[in-house]
Image (cartoon, helix red, strand yellow):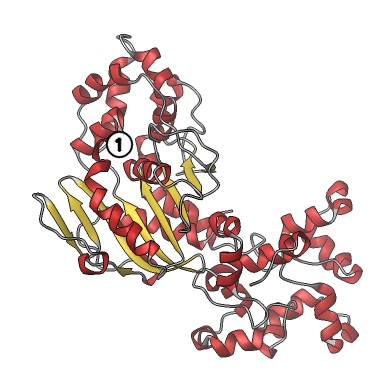
Amino acid sequence: MPTVRDYTLAQFASTAFENTPSALPGGFTPLTPAALGVVVDAPGESFANGVYRQDNAAALVGTGVLGGLNTIVLAFRGADDRTDSNNVLRDPATDYPKFAELVAAVDRLAASGAYQQVAVTGHSLGGSLAQIFMANHPAGATTVHYVSDTFGSPGALVPDANDARITNYVVVDDPAVFLGENREAVGNTIDGNLLLERPAAELAARVFPGLTVDDALDAIPTFSANYENAGGTVNLPGKAGGTGPISSVTGLLQADPAQHAISNYIRELGNIAFRLPGSGNEGLFDRDFYLQRNADVAAAGIDAKQHFDTHGWREGRDASAVFDTGFYLQNNRDVAAAGVNPLAHFETHGWREGRAPDAFFDTGVYLRENPDVAAAGINPLVHYLLFGWNEGRDPGPAFDTASYLLANPDVAAAGINPLEHYLEFGINEGRVIA
């Protein structure tokens, strides 16, 4: 499930379109030519405010804490002019050599040991360039940890690899993604077809900035191979009124070009990332966790939250991976004696009284070590689940966020909350905390 890490990278992909960003997402700091060792001396080359440019090619670079680790973020700019848009249709790799100096500089800085991971992202053409970057930095080739999120990526001429480091977010009726990943079939269907060629070219001209209908018509004969998006795919619903998943050329011609906008991706990721484990007003209750752990409840078709409230907590069932019913009642005898729902007690009173929801989250320590959270009056467990882990904060002395992520790179690559992962899976898998 998308988290605040993915939302932050979507913001980076959007900010990469700006020539002079006023601020980077998530409190990140823009990298400078001096910090990267980049000498700006080529015609058409510039580097300011974290934005590197070489002719029409551009990327944004910054540093900060992402997914709990000290990170270099490299965000390739998506298509924003006619040249870029033609490259999307013909070969996204056309501009990649223009980033050679920047990529080499990022690799040097990453290899210095000053950072724990490199996150690569981009929207549209930027996502295609991120795919090329990751293909040129295969897993295991170096000790540097690379991860990537793409948004609305048409793909690139790269191997269709099952790369766990890459997540591709796709609005289901984004025409740019369907066109790229089905480029050969689209070309075979519309090339020379007088009824389809021009409508397809007109659609492309509305999707990609600066592209003309004639540009698109001229590019159609080059549609001889599909682009690939290596890694996994997460589908997003997109804006209201969309056509739903595209499954044919006819569906492509009916698609709304606005579904490709980066704003759709940011909105949908935000809706998911800033939701608590459950949904609606369920607070810290995790419906999916509860049903997976309690097959009898799932089989009976009973509402999970209602079951927990009426029977589950009395039977010692856990509300989520991070709320241990038995632990809370054993360590809070007054709550047990009162016959009070322990989760409801924690959400309304317990956290304010410094009570812990499980053996690894220390409410009092978290509030003491994070005075900004205490001052804001936020439930500290909620803060850690939504923001704290991504910012590298520790839930307590028994669990080190960064150490767990570094020891378990698959968890880091997936952008999963490390404490939730450990309590739900890691303990049984014998994973080390540090």
Q: Position of residue 27 (x, y in %)?
A: 37, 72
Q: Toward which corner of the image does residue 353 lie, by quadrant?
A: bottom right
Q: Residue at x 30, y 31 (%)?
A: 91
Taking depth in this image into account, of 167 and 103 the one nearest to the observer is: 103
Q: Position of residue 173 (x, y in %)?
A: 46, 35
The residue that mark 1 highlights is 93
368 relative to 90 in the view: left or right? right
Q: Does any portion of residue 207 appear in the rendered image?
A: no
Residue that lies at the very extreme toward the left in this rendered image = 43
Q: Which three-letter amino acid code belongs to the residue tagged 1? A: Ala
Q: Residue at x 14, y 57 (%)?
A: 46
Residue 429, image x, y percentages: 75, 59
What's the residue at 65%, 62% (across, down)?
A: 277
- Above-or-below relation of 431 to 128: below
Q: Does 358 sit left or right of 226 as displayed?
A: right
What secondary structure is found at the residue carrying circle 1? helix
> Does residue 115 appear anywhere in the picture?
yes
- The one nearer the camera, 162 or 222, is 162
Q: Is 427 located above or below residue 82 in the figure?
A: below
Name the quadrant containing residue 221.
Answer: top left
